[in-house]
């Protein structure tokens, strides 16, 4: 599952070497909404350096995958970032094929009250093939 969220970069942690061939790095953003959320992401392997170009307080867009695993009947969830780019205020860009999340905490393109089926708006139904 791929998502996108925007927020201000809060903290960047140093890279950690887990094994001789595997390294990770974590960072935290703060969403810009009524109840700000502190969200921690993880970068792995060659992606550990993508956060270096940003400074705390800068608005960024984070593209990430939701990852989960089981170990000895315990369950872990991780937000694995794969792309970070500079943001413009509270805007989040749309990436085709991904479920994108805006800074307001709602999914971009999610079903609206006037669109109960998640499809095109009612005025666009004229182009149906039948």
Image (cartoon, grey):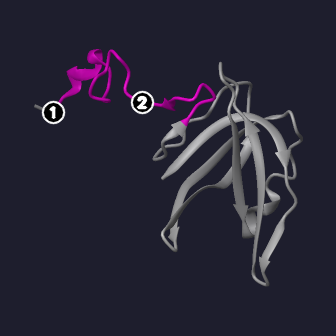
Residue name at image x 68 percent, y 52 percent: 83
Judge left or right: residue 100 versus residue 54: left
The x, y position of residue 9, in whole percent, is 80, 39
Of marks 2 and 1, the one in the foreground: 2
Judge by depth and name the residue closer to the eye, 35 or 66: 35
- For label 1, the crowd category at 10 Å Cα-Cα, with few meaning under 14, some 14 to 19 and many 20 or more, is few
Is 21 left, or right, of 78 in this rendering?
Answer: right
- Dot placed on the residue nearer the N-terminal end, 2 or 1: 2
Residue identifier under label 1: 129
Instruction: Look at mark 2 in the image and give the residue it sits on.
Output: 110
Q: Alpha-carbon distance for marks 2 and 1?
A: 24 Å
Q: Nearer the viewer, residue 121 or 89?
A: 89
Q: Is residue 21 above or below residue 127?
A: below
The percent position of residue 35, horizontal first and vertical second, equals 66, 23
Residue lying at 67% horizontally and 35% vertically, measured from the top left: 6
The residue positioned 69% from the left and 31% from the top of the image is 31
Q: Are marks 2 and 1 in contact (CB under 8 Å)?
A: no
Asked whether 18 falls inside the magenta stretch, the response is no
Residue 16 vertical position relative to residue 79 in the rendered view, above or below: below
Magenta run includes residue 126: yes
- Is 107 displayed left or right of 26 in the figure? left
Secondary structure under badge 2? loop
- Magenta-tinted stretch: 101-128
């Amino acid at each position: 599952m791929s998502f996108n969220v925007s927020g201000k970069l809060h903290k960047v942690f140093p890279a950690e070497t887990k094994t001789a061939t595997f390294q990770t790095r974590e960072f935290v953003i703060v969403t810009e909404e009524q109840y700000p959320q502190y969200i921690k992401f993880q970068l792995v392997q060659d992606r550990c350096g993508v956060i270096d170009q940003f400074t705390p307080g800068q608005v960024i867009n984070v593209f990430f995958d939701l990852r989960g695993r089981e170990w000895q009947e315990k369950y872990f969830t991780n937000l694995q970032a794969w792309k970070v780019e500079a943001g413009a205020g509270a805007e989040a860009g749309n990436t085709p094929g991904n479920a994108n999340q805006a800074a307001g905490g709602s999914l971009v393109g999610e079903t609206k009250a006037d669109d109960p089926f998640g499809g095109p708006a009612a005025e666009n139904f004229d182009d149906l093939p039948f």
